[in-house]
Image (tube, rainbow, N blue to C red):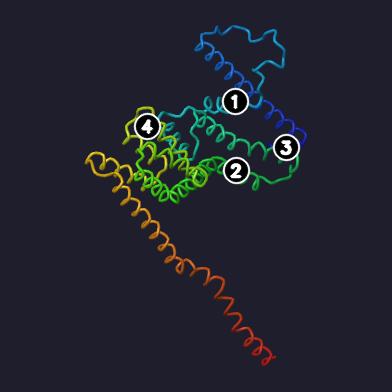
Amino acid sequence: MLSSLSQTQLLSITAMFLALSLSAIAVFIHRTIKQNRIMSRRLAGVPAHTHTRSNTPASGRKNNKPFLATPKMIAAFGQHLTLPGPEEITRMRFLLSQAGYYTTKAIPVFYAIRVVSLFLPLVLLMGYWAFFAPDMPSRTLIPLAVFMIIAGLFLPLFVLRSKINRRKNQAREGFPDMMDLLLACIEAGMGLDTALSNVAKELGKRYPVIQINLDLLNLELMAGRTRSEAFKNFAERLGLEEASALNIMLRQSEEMGSSLGAALRTFSEEMRNKRMMKAEEKAMALPAKMTVPLILFIFPTIMVLLFLPAGIRISEGIM
């Protein structure tokens, strides 16, 4: 059916489809923002039909903020396009917090990015096919479209999990330093809450991941949450076994009434030994990892250098 249409007709159909899609999206976003404004006014006790215009000059108005409207539009678009269940929202909130996104708009923005990454490559592919490559065969166009759909569907999650892994590695690298500073503060006579605040300030420039999570830990303690629960949330945000072990050690020390400084010293030494063991493990695994590059690249080169002169002489003798 498409082969029977001319190029002008195909371009017209594509342009109409794009215009209708963009118009529908714009109308949907406008209605969503309007509903959110009405709900905000009702919660604030302002009538919904009150006009926002006033006699003040345009320079004094605070409603014209185009740069602040774009994130709100993306968040509202993602929130109303996708309606996941509470379990899915909880799981995504946990993943986003591990990646460093703690705001309330992180979930709708993430779902909006997933929708855009799913449909935008297809729109670009259609535009390229209509305007620049109308002779592209279907056996090339269809696999390319399928590949873009799969990439747009899984790319946001892949980027999110890669960022989580980077933050985990950074936190694992700085965790022994955090324990040494915490031990020094405790032995200097500080309380645990004050020590955590000072450690967060000291580690801020080098390990910002640990600083942010320690600040959240201090905020939870200031809000009245129990120390065991706050450290449990701290360990879940970091996603490290060392943080979970720290939570268990602090809880046992508090229940048994043992010295916190001695327990932290023992735990800090274990963290240092664990770091050295991991470094030695990587060093011991290096020869095994170098075996494949040696066999694929260096060994054939050596064989060519050894046998090439003899092969040349043999070929000359035969000729």
Q: Circle 4 sits in a helix, a strand or a loop, which is it?
A: helix
> Which residue is identified by label 3?
4
Q: Give the SS element for disc 1.
A: helix
Sequence-first disc among 1 and 4: 1
Residue at image point 69% right, 46% down: 137
**Mark found first going from the N terminus, 1 or 3:** 3
Residue type marked 4: Leu
Please identify the quadrant where the C terminus is shown.
Answer: bottom right
Q: Nearer the viewer, mark 2 or mark 3?
A: 2
List the single residue furthest toward the bottom: 317
Labels 1 & 2 near each other (Cβ < 8 A): no
Residue positioned most to the left: 256
Q: Looking at the picture, which amino acid does disc 1 mark?
A: Met
Which amino acid type corresponds to the residue marked 2 in the rendered image?
Met
Q: Position of residue 120 (x, y in %)?
A: 63, 36
**Residue 73: numbered disc:** 1
For label 2, the crowd category at 10 Å Cα-Cα, with few meaning under 14, some 14 to 19 and many 20 or more, is some
